[in-house]
Each structure stands twice: as C-alpha cells, then as structure tokens.
Image (cartoon, grey):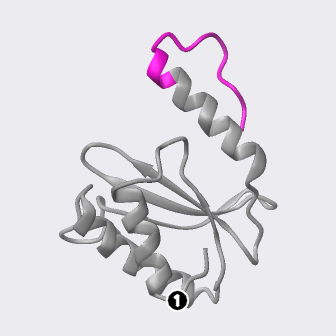
Amino acid sequence: MRKPLGKVKNPSLAKKLRRKLSIRAKINGTAERPRLCATKTNKHLRVQVIDDVTEKTLLSVQTYGKNGVSGAKANREGAKLLGVKLAEELKGKKIEKAVFDRSGSTYTGVLSVLVDSVRENGIQI
C-alpha cells in the first residue's frame, strides 16, 4: 500500500493511516490464506477477501448494493449476518483459513463480532 502524497491534515485520520500502514507491513494474504480487509463506516460494513500475491479481490461482502446482505447495518447484528454470509462464500471457494486486516480500526465492538461470527462458522482466522 502506498502512502498518500502530501500531509494528512486531520490528526485522527493521520493516526488511522499510520496504524493502517503499520498493520499492512506485517500482514500478507495468499491464495491459500487470503486477507480479510474490513471497512466500517457509520452506515455500512464491507469485507473484501484479497489475494495479495496476484493482487486480486477474490470476493466481497457488504451491507449495501445488489449483492449486499439484506437487513444488515453497521451494528453488531449486521456484523453477525455479514460474518455468516462471508463464511458461506469462503467455504464455497474452498478457503478454510484467512488473515484479518482491521484497516487501522480498533478491534472492538462491531469488528470483533464480525470476526467471531466468521470463526463460529468454520473459518480459521
């Protein structure tokens, strides 16, 4: 991941970017063990399954759009539904292990519920 050109003026966004770059320096996804990149906003959740070797997104699950999980929002209940759907799609692609990338966000609340839901449905993280 490349650093942005110029300085990030918002201090909280600058800290988040620094954490994100620090995490990405240590985490790498492969075809056998892809990277689950979770993004949370106030309204929506999005999880991408990425193979960093070939630089391809294998699949994506989100709370919006035509392929979105119906009834899911950016809360704990929505994270559980998203985790179940993500685990089903990973099993459909015969992927049993993955690496979690929290993208600079803290590992509490919605993100921890999301990962626990994926683990409960048979994916090793």
Which residue, as the protein is rendered here, is positioned at the far front?
Answer: 108
- Position of 13 relative to 91 (above/below): above
- Residue at 69% across, 26% down: 3
Seen at 72% across and 32% down, the residue is 2
Q: Quadrant of the N terminus?
A: top right
| Residue where numbered disc 1 is placed | 122
Identify the secondary structure beneath mark 1. Answer: loop
In the displayed structure, 101 sits above or below 90; it is above
Does the image show residue 40?
A: yes
| Magenta stretch, residue numbers | 1-13
Q: Position of residue 72 (x, y in %)?
A: 23, 66
Classified by dominant secondary structure, the portion drawn in magenta counts as loop
- Percent coordinates x, y for residue 51 in the rendering: 71, 64
Q: Nearer the viewer, residue 117 or 96?
A: 117
Residue 31 belongs to the span the image colors magenta: no
**Outermost residue, right side:** 53
Q: Where's the C terminus, which quadrant? A: bottom right
Instruction: Give how far across and how far down residue 116 sits, in percent.
Output: 44, 73
> Is 99 on the left-hand or right-hand side of 80?
right
